[in-house]
Image: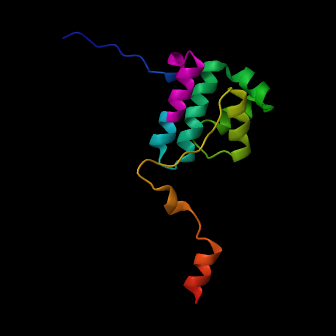
Amino acid sequence: MSKTTTTRYDVAEHLRTPEEMAAYLEACLEEADGDATCIAKALGDIARAKGMAQVAKDAGLSRESLYKALSGERSPDFDTILKVIGALGLKLHAEVPRGRSRTSTQRPSSRTAKRRAA
């Protein structure tokens, strides 16, 4: 029987365009289920694809601190996340989850609140 040779898969080698990077981050945001370290790791993958030194410079951070923040071993500060996202040329956005009614997130009017209190 012959030996099978494998190589380590590195997603950063496959993130070539801004659209691919955005799609990867979007998928990670959906799959992370609130795990900030997972999001940090995804941002680290994208930063490595773009060049960690350039991303660090554009974010105003040292390369070493950027590697630590995006290692996926700890949860970085939100301001660091925002700086990195900006340096990567990406944007965050918010949307209502599928299946959730808009009215369920609205606050009651003051008239409705007064009637409930009475």
Query: Residue 22: x and y, percent?
Result: 56, 28
Q: Which residue is farthest front?
A: 111
Relative side of 103 to 83, left or right: left
Residue toward you, 75 or 46: 46
Magenta stretch? Answer: 12-26
- Image quarter in which the C terminus is found: bottom right
The correct choice, above or below, for 16 with respect to 76 in the image is: above
What residue is drawn where x is 56% and y is 35%? 41
What residue is drawn where x is 36% and y is 16%? 6
Residue 117 colored in magenta in the image: no
Residue toward you, 43 or 106: 106
What residue is drawn where x is 63% and y is 38%? 92
The correct choice, above or below, for 67 with respect to 16 in the image is: below
Q: Which residue is farthest right?
A: 60
Residue 14 colored in magenta in the image: yes
Query: Residue 86: x and y, percent?
Result: 72, 32
The correct choice, above or below, for 116 with respect to 96 in the image is: below
Q: Which residue is farthest bottom?
A: 118
What residue is drawn where x is 51% and y is 28%? 23
Relative side of 96 to 86, left or right: left
Query: Residue 29: x and y, percent?
Result: 51, 40
Query: Residue 76: x and y, percent?
Result: 66, 44
Residue 57, located in which quarter of the rendered image? top right
- Image quarter in which the N terminus is found: top left
Q: Specify the principal SS of the magenta part.
A: helix
Whether residue 42 appears in this view of the structure is yes
Residue toward you, 71 or 103: 103
For the rendered model, the colour scheme is rainbow
In the rendered picture of this protein, how many numbered marks are placed on residues? 0
Whether residue 72 appears in this view of the structure is no
The correct choice, above or below, for 39 with respect to 118 in the image is: above
Q: Which residue is farthest top?
A: 2
